[in-house]
């Protein structure tokens, strides 16, 4: 479990930053200056590189620079089991993070620890 000041980020947070949404610039800056320490799953990495824009080398470079701010977490057996339980018990798709703007996905989860980085 991440410590205080540490966050697991969902792909929507990073995608919105890459799209240039202003609120995310300040949020990601907190990782750049070391105020926050972040993690992303390999699923998030795949999602970021799967978008058509990532075919462009400058866009790939932006993704790589952004990902360099985070520790990449593999999906191991325990994470896969947790994802399966959340899917089965709450109807969630494969959850790869708990820092997200997609809070509606977690409505049925009791006491989720979610952070919405920008409204």
Image (cartoon, helix red, strand yellow):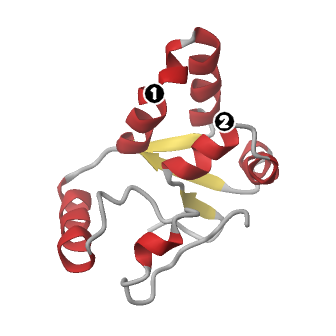
Residue 104 appearing in the image: yes
Q: Earlier in the sequence, mark 1 or mark 2?
A: 2
Q: Quadrant of the N terminus?
A: bottom left
From what the image shows, is residue 67 above or below residue 100? Answer: above
CA distance for labels 1 and 2: 12 Å
Q: Residue 74, which numbered label?
A: none
Per the image, the residue denoted by label 2 is 18
Task: Tell me which residue sits at (63%, 53%) in the image.
Answer: 37
Residue 101, percent from left and from top: 58, 63
Residue 38, percent from left and from top: 58, 52
Describe residue 87's horizontal placement relative to residue 39 as left or right. left
Relative depth, front residue between 9 and 36: 9
Task: Tell me which residue sits at (51%, 43%) in the image.
Answer: 71
Per the image, the residue denoted by label 1 is 49
* Total tally of numbered discs in the picture: 2
Task: Tell me which residue sits at (69%, 63%) in the image.
Answer: 117
From what the image shows, is residue 68 above or below residue 56? Answer: below
Element under label 2?
helix
């Amino acid at each position: 479990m991440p410590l205080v000041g540490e966050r697991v980020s969902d792909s929507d947070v990073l995608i919105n930053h890459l799209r240039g949404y202003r609120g995310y610039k300040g949020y990601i800056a907190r990782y750049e200056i070391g105020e926050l320490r972040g993690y992303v799953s390999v699923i998030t990495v795949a999602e970021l590189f799967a978008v058509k824009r990532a075919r462009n080398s400058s866009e790939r470079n932006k993704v790589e620079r952004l990902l360099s701010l985070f520790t990449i977490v593999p999906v191991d057996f325990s994470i896969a089991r947790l994802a399966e339980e959340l899917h089965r018990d709450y109807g969630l798709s494969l959850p790869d993070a708990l820092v997200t703007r997609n809070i509606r996905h977690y409505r049925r989860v009791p006491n989720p620890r979610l952070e919405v980085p920008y409204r």
